Image: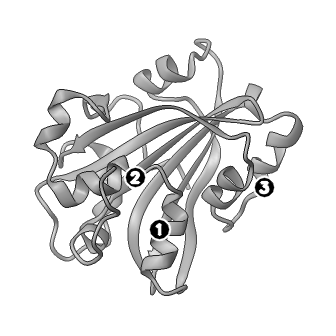
Amino acid sequence: MPSVFNKSLHEPVWMDVHARGATAVPEQVYAWLKDPASLTRRVTDACDGRFRVRVRFQGWGKALNSETRLLQLGLREICLIREVELLCNDEPQVFARTLMPVSSLTGAARQLAQLRNKPLGKVLFADSHTRRKQVQIARFLPQHKSFQSAVSHLREVPEELWGRRTLFLYAGKPILVNEVFLPTLVDRVPGPHRV
């Protein structure tokens, strides 16, 4: 199955989570975007434990242009790309896309290539040395392929979605995690408290 992302399609406009433009984000959504805790843990808690991860794609590929810059990749460097849904009662709550450069999958980080249906967040947040280097947010619109992938299961398609991407250092290696928040989560479950 090919990756649901296509490098030739338009990307959303990313901004720092604390940028002035972030005030345009609906408050309930912004609480989720800004929350520093493990998203896996938050969704699990909101689901009363009826949580699972469904892998939609895992394979080698090229990062999108903005991802290449953020990860500081060489022009020919490839990544292990993992695209999943975080499910509550078998209903997708979050669409996530993780990029792990080949150069990052060494040492302790090698285990990230073997996650299968295990939540990435459990691994990242279990290590006290994991660091968040940068958090950006974006509004996803119907012309973005990631929007289409995230809402493919919905009967009623929203006009927009919001998401974030976080550049982590895990075992000293860069890992980029993109998360698109679905209405099933933000409309039904109160967001974390603003900090």
Q: From the viewer's side, name the closer residue of 9 and 159.
A: 159
Residue at the spot of label 1 = 42
In the figure, 6 relative to 43: above or below? above
Q: Residue at x 49, y 87 (%)?
A: 48
Left or right for 86, reference 91: right
Looking at marks 1 and 2 on the same chain, the residue that comes earlier in the sequence is marked by 2
The local secondary structure at tag 2 comes to: loop
Name the residue nearer the viewer: 98 or 131. 131
Which badge, 1 or 3, is on the more N-terminal residue?
Answer: 1
Residue 85: image location, x then y, percent: 48, 65
Mark 1 crowdedness (10 Å alpha carbons): few <14, some 14-19, many ≥20: some
Q: Residue at x 24, y 57 (%)?
A: 29
Residue 173: which disc? none
Quick check: 146 above or below 138?
A: below
- Which amino acid does the dot numbered 1 rest on? Arg
Corner quadrant of residue 100: top right
Give the alpha-carbon distance from disc 1 to disc 3, as whole Å.
23 Å
Tell me the quadrant of the picture where the N terminus can be found.
bottom right
Give the percent coordinates (x, y) of residue 88. Answer: 45, 80
Q: Which residue is mark 3?
A: 114
Q: Nearer the viewer, mark 2 or mark 3?
A: 2
